[in-house]
Amino acid sequence: MRYAEDFQQQVSRSIEASIAVKARLLSSAECISTVAKVSVVLVDCIQRGNKILLFGNGGSAADAQHIAAEFVGRFAFNRRALAALALSVNTSCLTAIGNDYGFELVFSRQLEALGRPGDVAIGISTSGNSTNILEAASVAKELGLQTIGLTGNGGGKLKHLVDYCVIVPSNDTPRIQECHILVGHILSELVEQTIFHGQAELIEEKSCVSGS
């Protein structure tokens, strides 16, 4: 088949590149420590009755929605819904704010409306320099929210504005985004396991009993 051999080689190279960045992430004690600390922040947020607000542009907007869905829906097992919201989902709100105030305020304006002290704001930007993410991080701090950044490229300006910053050791946008969703899955798993410890085992036991 035409191009098939070349495509196979490219597929292999892309997978190898993704594995290499994840290996660097794994070998970074700072990254591992930061993800663990962020997990604690999210557990405490949910247990206080607060919520998680996520935002990003483009692929990072999709990541924000994906991670929010893991909390509101489920990650590994059935349990009650957890309060999380991606600020990129309301197109009427985004376009109204963008048109009336400017695109740089599409997330910060929503944080003014929805954010409360004790909530957690998670800004996702592969460069760490997206203007609307930086503006939202600044406003979140002013409102008394805890702030977290998911970035690459050395962290950009965002690393100086947030309480915790997970910096993927890469300058390649696709590889950074792949690690961001990995981190999102890890956070979802740790929060779910911690808040509902024992529930997964109980569900599994019930399943085994009913199956027998």
Image (spheres, rainbow, N blue to C red):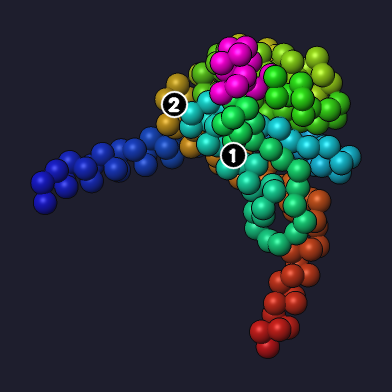
Residue at mark 1: 65
Magenta part, dominant SS: helix
Query: Is residue 96 located in the magenta-colored stretch of the structure?
Result: yes
Residue at mark 2: 173
Query: Is residue 104 located in the magenta-colored stretch of the structure?
Result: yes
Residue 180 in sight:
no
Outermost residue on the bottom side: it is: 212
Q: Quadrant of the C terminus?
A: bottom right
Residue 58 in sight:
yes
Say above or below: 127 vs 28: above
Residue 153 placement (x, y as % from top left): 51, 18
46 vs 186, left or right, is: right
- Decide which of 98, 145 is in the foreground and name it: 98
Q: Which residues are magenta?
A: 95-108
Say above or below: 77 vs 113: below
15 vs 187, left or right, is: left
- Decide which of 15, 49 is in the foreground and name it: 49
Numbered label attached to residue 164: none
